[in-house]
Image (tube, rainbow, N blue to C red):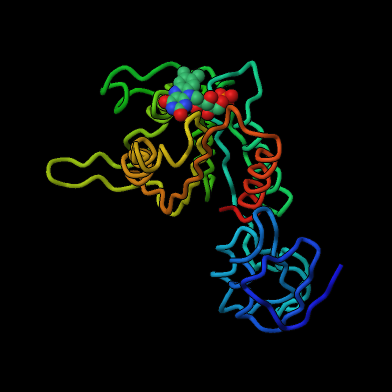
């Protein structure tokens, strides 16, 4: 392994086996730009004022001893969060790539000190909501009472599902219709009064797998169903910010590419992002 001190040429990609020893903070963004896909920039220290920017980079890992005297990756100063992982794939019989992704996210989150609860919608039996009166005045199905408690408990929700007919699978929509009830998720605004959002103070990440390339969905279809979910469902009840990860062309994806996505999701889970 080669070590270099204090110098970095952004024109040169960093090889995986070179350590840059640079006591100059400005080199970090340059190094991040140049690092190869899947590679990491490892930093042995950081200034608290730069921490927020630092955490924006998935490929950046901080190790070593820091200002506050602590050491190791936990030194991100990140408070442990309560994370609810919702696996929205309707198939109960088979494990899909989406399950591997949500498992990688949950495992890394738990290993990094976050509290994690995991809901697999395919294994919960619940009826479809059928009327406004049921929505407003009916009881939440017994099988979903604990799911509502989990949502209230969570500070961050990670929602995984495959794109079906351009949107979320009916099972997930059915679940959201049942749990996002007036009085629980928002107040029903009477007259000209706007409904108040009751699930504020929570963030979310939506992770969607799809058959088409993600770029096609994002740019040609304008990611319409994700926008609707962000604005009309999560935003409407106060969940904000909402981040998204779109994973396209999953069906013919190489093993190497899959591993790369699993790593990315583990990084996000570790950061509760
Ligand atoms: C009923 C159904 C509808 C689908 N609709 C779409 C679609 O509209 N757009 C798309 O890109 N992929 C679509 N797909 C492909 C899935 O998104 C893809 O298979 C899934 O994300 C990953 O595969 P998995 O189910 O094995 O996890 C559909 C698949 C099924 C079974």
Residue beneath the point at 66% across and 23% down:
95
Residue farthest right in this picture: 1
Quarter of the rendering occupied by the N terminus: bottom right
Q: State whether residue 52 is above or below residue 192.
A: below
Residue beneath the point at 68% across and 78% down:
8
Residue beneath the point at 41% across and 37% down:
217
Instruction: Locate residue 92: give its quadrant.
Output: top right
Does 208 sit left or right of 13 as displayed?
left
Figure disc tally: 0
Percent across and percent down for residue 96 are 63, 26
Instruction: Locate residue 250: give its quadrant.
Output: top right
Q: State whether residue 95 is above or below residue 58.
A: above
The residue lying toward the viewer, choosing from 92 and 251, is 251
Does 182 sit left or right of 84 as displayed?
left
Residue beneath the point at 74% across and 50% down:
111
> Do we see residue 188 in this rendering?
yes
> Do we see residue 141 in this rendering?
no
Percent across and percent down for residue 249 are 54, 33
The residue lying toward the viewer, choosing from 134 and 163, is 163
Residue farthest front in this picture: 11
Percent across and percent down for residue 160 are 53, 35
The residue lying toward the viewer, choosing from 192 and 162, is 162
Q: State whether residue 207 is above or below residue 119.
A: below
The residue lying toward the viewer, choosing from 52 and 262, is 262
């Amino acid at each position: 392994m080669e070590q270099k001190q204090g110098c970095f040429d952004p024109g040169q990609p960093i090889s995986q086996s070179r350590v840059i020893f640079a006591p100059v903070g400005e080199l970090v963004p340059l190094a991040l730009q140049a690092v190869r896909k899947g590679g990491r920039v490892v930093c042995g220290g950081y200034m608290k004022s730069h921490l927020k920017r630092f955490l924006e980079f998935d490929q950046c890992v901080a190790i070593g001893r820091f200002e506050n005297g602590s050491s190791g990756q936990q030194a991100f100063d990140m408070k442990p969060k309560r994370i609810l992982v919702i696996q929205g794939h309707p198939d109960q019989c088979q494990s899909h790539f989406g399950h591997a992704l949500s498992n990688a996210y949950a495992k890394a989150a738990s290993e990094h000190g976050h509290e994690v609860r995991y809901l697999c919608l395919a294994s919960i039996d619940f009826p479809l909501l059928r009327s406004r009166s049921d929505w407003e005045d009916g009881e939440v199905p017994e099988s979903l009472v604990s799911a509502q408690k989990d949502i209230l408990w969570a500070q961050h929700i990670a929602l995984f599902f495959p794109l079906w007919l351009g949107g979320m699978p009916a099972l997930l929509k059915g679940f959201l219709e049942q749990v996002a009830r007036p009085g629980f998720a928002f107040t029903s605004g009477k007259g000209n009064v706007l409904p108040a959002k009751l699930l504020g103070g929570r963030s979310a990440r939506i992770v969607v797998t799809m058959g088409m390339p993600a770029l096609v969905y994002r740019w040609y279809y304008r990611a319409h169903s994700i926008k609707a979910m962000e604005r009309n469902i999560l935003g409407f009840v106060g969940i904000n910010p909402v981040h998204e990860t779109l994973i396209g062309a999953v069906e013919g994806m190489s093993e190497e590419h899959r591993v790369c996505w699993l790593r990315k999701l583990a990084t996000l889970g570790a950061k509760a992002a």
